[in-house]
Amino acid sequence: MAAVEVERLARRYGEREALSGVSLSLQRGQTLVVLGPNGAGKTTLLRILAALLRPHAGEVRVLDRRLPEESWRVRGRVGLLAHEPMLYRSLTAEENLRFHARLHGVDEQRVTDLLAELSLSERAREPLRMLSRGMVQRVAIARAVLHEPELLLLDEPYANLDPAALHLVGPLIGAASGRTRVLCSHDPAAALREADTVLGLREGRVAVQGAAEEVSTAELEALYR
């Protein structure tokens, strides 16, 4: 059963087409990796799937719900890790996560458990502005998975993470998590290792698409030339 179905999706910013004629299908439990240079439309696609941005044309279904008509039924079932961490820098890691826990009706013990799992407990009561970029990224990952989402939308999820942190976040957002994922990346070789299917965008249009085993690294690297 498909977790995401998109047909002929289009989105504009003024006169500029951010996405044009994009179609894709992602089955539950699988990972779609989206690649392309800056401005290719990756972030716009994630925001539409997260029900934060309305398409101008096309059909979008996420978790069996039509967007944007049923956005309110989707938002609580999706976890978004955006390029910007979507956290309050004046609050502590613990305060940020407790705030989101209340929004989603999540038991606050989940906050304590995630902070421990990501080795953040000792720094949990410091303002985010005092933490390193890698620690802030770990807090953002905790926020994205806090409510046990059915679908993860991940924009460069491993940015700023050292090898030890990568080991910590793997069970939460990596292939081992078992979650359905849409993952935006700039690293074709690493992306192919994580992907079931691949979508390559250039200037808002599909340039490469297919099963991971059918797409070559050379095809994906060509997106950036």
Image: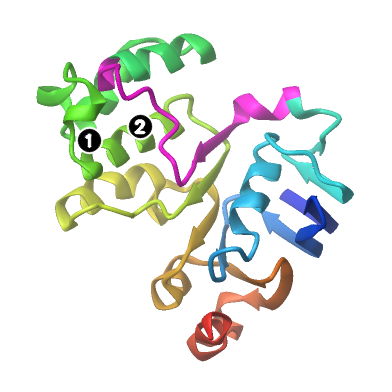
**Tag shown at residue 26:** none
Q: Residue at x 54, y 82 (%)?
A: 220
Q: Residue at x 60, y 84 (%)?
A: 214
Asked whether 135 falls inside the magenta stretch, the response is: no
Contact? badges 2 and 1 (CB < 8 Å):
yes
Q: Which residues are magenta?
A: 72-94
In terms of depth relative to the viewer, which is nearer, 85 or 147? 85
Residue found at the very far bottom of the displayed protein: 218
**Tag shown at residue 118:** 1
Q: Is residue 206 above or below residue 75?
A: below
Q: In the image, residue 199 lies at what x, y percent?
A: 64, 69
Q: Which residue is mark 2?
A: 142
- For mark 2, give the secondary structure: helix
- Number of callouts in the render? 2
In terms of depth relative to the viewer, which is nearer, 51 or 202? 202
Residue type, numbered disc 2: Ala
Q: Residue at x 37, y 22 (%)?
A: 88
Q: Is residue 124 above or below residue 27?
A: above
